[in-house]
Image: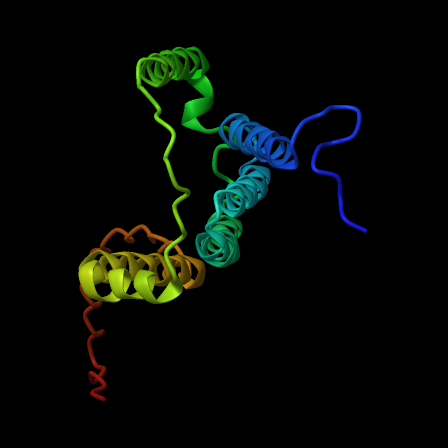
Amino acid sequence: MSLPETVPFLGWAWDDLLFLFFAGALLGTGLMVVIGRNIIRSGLWMICCFGALAGLYVLLGAPLIAAAQVLIYIGAISVLVLFAVMLTQSKSGPVGLVFHHQAWAGALAALGIGILVAVVVAGTAWPLAETARTPSPTEELALLLFRDYVLPLEVVSVLLLAAVIGGVFLAKREREPEETIVPAEPARERMPAPAPAVGTRELTP
């Protein structure tokens, strides 16, 4: 049994409903990443944000990029960030972050960027394409990555390797015990040995 072309009781197309769902989830989870006070929960919200973005890629007809989004960003980077935070977080360190004291500045910056994006979107003409663009096959994408853009790809791989090495180094670093400074004893004055009594011989070792 096939699904109807429109959503019952709403009259919307399924693509529009899914787009609204994934877009709302992307904005909501992204906001929770920024305003969250627990960095572990912010990392979990970031995973949900990446998942919503992968859903948008599927709706745009790019399943390969959606799969890469899930495998790389969710399966590798997000998990790496969570493990790095959990392994390197100090219990004696401050609980709050510096950005929590800049809420008004962040809100004003976000409002300004939102107004700028709205002005650009409203002032840009969006002509409809005559024919739908077919997604690039996997072979063409592989040629672009490993032939035309091989240098940026290698730079990204080196940066990820450096992040892994840094996380392992910070996790395995042992705290050196603090050296205890022992105060020096005052020098004792050497007293001369008493002179032997008359009629006795001095014992020599």
Q: Is residue 121 visible?
A: yes
Question: In the image shown, does 177 or 172 lie closer to the viewer?
Answer: 172
Question: In the image shown, does 182 or 39 lie closer to the viewer?
Answer: 39
Image location (x, y in percent) of residue 22? 58, 35
Image location (x, y in percent) of residue 146? 25, 66
* Number of numbered tags placed on the structure image: 0
Taking 198 as reference, is 99 above or below it? above
Left or right, 47 with reference to 130: right
Taking 202 as reference, is 34 above or below it? above
Left or right, 42 with reference to 155: right
Of all residues shown, which one is farthest toward the front?
Answer: 130
Image location (x, y in percent) of residue 124? 31, 18
Question: In the image shown, does 115 or 56 lie closer to the viewer?
Answer: 56
Image location (x, y in percent) of residue 16? 60, 31
Residue shown at 32%/20% (left/top)? 125
> Residue 143 sits in which quadrant?
bottom left
> Residue 91 sits in which quadrant?
top right
The quadrant in which the C terminus is found is: bottom left
Left or right, 99 with reference to 38: left
Taking 14 as reference, is 159 above or below it? below
Of all residues shown, which one is farthest toward the bottom?
Answer: 205
Residue shown at 53%/28% (left/top)? 27
Residue shown at 50%/28% (left/top)? 96
Q: Is residue 161 visible?
A: no
Q: How is the image coloured?
A: rainbow
